[in-house]
Amino acid sequence: MQVVPINQVSQHFHFPSPSHPTVLKMESFQNLPQGWHYGEGGSCSPRMLRQAIRLHRGIINLGFSETDAFPGVDGGILLAVYEGTEYFALRLEVDGTITYYRETQDVEVDEQEGLTCTQALEILRMYRKETWTPSASYIFDIMKFIKNASVPKRMHLTAIPFRLWMPPALSV
């Protein structure tokens, strides 16, 4: 077993594995026939797929676990990220840029266009930083890595209430 300090996680975090369901779904977009969407649309390019997998890896490394992907008629890819009542959509455009959307309880609260992969991940990183309280961040800060495994196993800790026992006051 190998334990990695939190400041070195990005060097050792090789996730998602090629068999991640969202990655497998994105890989299938290369095989879409011409006209797959009511006579329109084609497959995505290998470059687009590589960018989408790279972005997805970053999303997973930030601690998001519920993701999905959808092909665009123009050859782009939409990556969806679900976090409770939050929904993030990262649309990889054919020109190489990313359009970011965020919805909270089905209401759009943010949209940014023309982003790079790094900028889009920074937005998600800032969201993660704002929403994780110090008491909840132990899930991300304490990880157990099994050597030669492509997927880290997280240690789930249960908080136990602590009461300080004080003897009853002496009556005088």
Image (tube, helix red, strand yellow):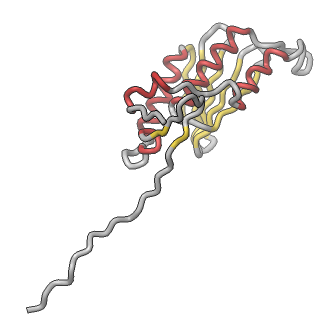
Q: Quadrant of residue 102?
A: top right
Residue 17 pos. (x, y %):
64, 27
- Judged from this view, the residue extending furthest toward the bottom is 172
- Tell which of 61 and 150 is nearer to you: 150
| Horizontal side of residue 165 vs 126, given as left or right | left
Residue drawn at point x = 63 percent, y = 38 percent: 66
Q: Quadrant of the C terminus?
A: bottom left
Residue 98 pos. (x, y %):
60, 17
Relative height, residue 167 to residue 55 (above, below): below
- Tell which of 65 and 125 is nearer to you: 65
- Judged from this view, the residue extending furthest toward the left is 172
| Horizontal side of residue 97 vs 23, given as left or right | left
Relative height, residue 76 to residue 169 (above, below): above
Residue 52 pos. (x, y %):
65, 18
Residue drawn at point x = 38 percent, y = 65 percent: 161
Residue drawn at point x = 50 percent, y = 35 percent: 145
Q: Quadrant of residue 24?
A: top right
Residue 84 pos. (x, y %):
58, 45
- Tell which of 166 and 38 is nearer to you: 166
Q: Quadrant of residue 81?
A: top right
Relative height, residue 150 to residue 72 (above, below): below
Relative height, residue 49 to residue 90 (above, below): above
